[in-house]
Image (spheres, helix red, strand yellow):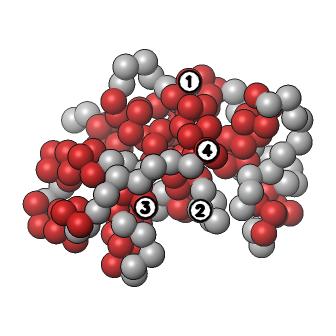
Amino acid sequence: MDLEMDFEEHVLACVLSRALDEVEAGEATATEATGLSRAELLDILIRIFPTSLIHGFSLEEVRDSEPGMEEELLRRLLLTHGRPADPTSARFAKIIARRALRDGHLWEELGLVDRSELSRLLATHFPTLAAGNTNNMKWKKYLYHKLCEAEGFSLCAAPTCRECKEFKSCFGPEEG
């Protein structure tokens, strides 16, 4: 059994479940929810999931969504640390960058069971980035910290962090 592939399928199922909830609630299209193109979504659905799932995403009605500047910066950061020439890592970079723009914790916005699953995903597909998180910083906080660091700033928070009800726990000690 290919445990890495099974884990990747699990992550995709989690993300697509969140996306489908948003599509059904009228909050986003499938491409807006995932950051993937219509063609990429269709490829994933056809290769991995039951055909009946495709119709729920209403892909025939959606257009590809263009990333904003912040999302593009996050994508580039991830891709810089991604596995070279790996289309799966490139797709996860798009998904992670898009979901990082949401208000909740990144692992929750991806629909994952817990933070350790996000850690595993990042270590697998973006190993040098994950290895740099030596203080076990929260992942969204860490990604934005790396973006700020690249711009020459030392203290930054993700835009959604300032409004978070868990701000004190995220900006407190980094254990756990």
Residue 13 spot, x, y in % from top left: 32, 57
In the image, what residue occupies the spot 48% across and 39% down? 93
The circle on residue 80 is 1
Evaluate whether residue 136 shows in this view. no
Q: CA distance from mark 3 to mark 1?
A: 23 Å
Of the numbered discs 4 and 2, the one sitting upstream in the chain is 4
Q: CA distance from mark 4 to mark 2?
A: 15 Å
What residue would you read off at disc 2?
102
Q: CA distance from mark 2 to mark 3?
A: 10 Å
In the image, what residue occupies the spot 48% across and 57% down? 110
Q: CA distance from mark 3 to mark 4?
A: 17 Å
Give amino acid for label 3. Ala
Query: Residue pushed farthest left?
Result: 51
Local secondary structure at mark 2: loop
The circle on residue 33 is 3
In the picture, residue 51 is in which quadrant? bottom left
Depth check, mark 4 against mark 1: the one in front is 4
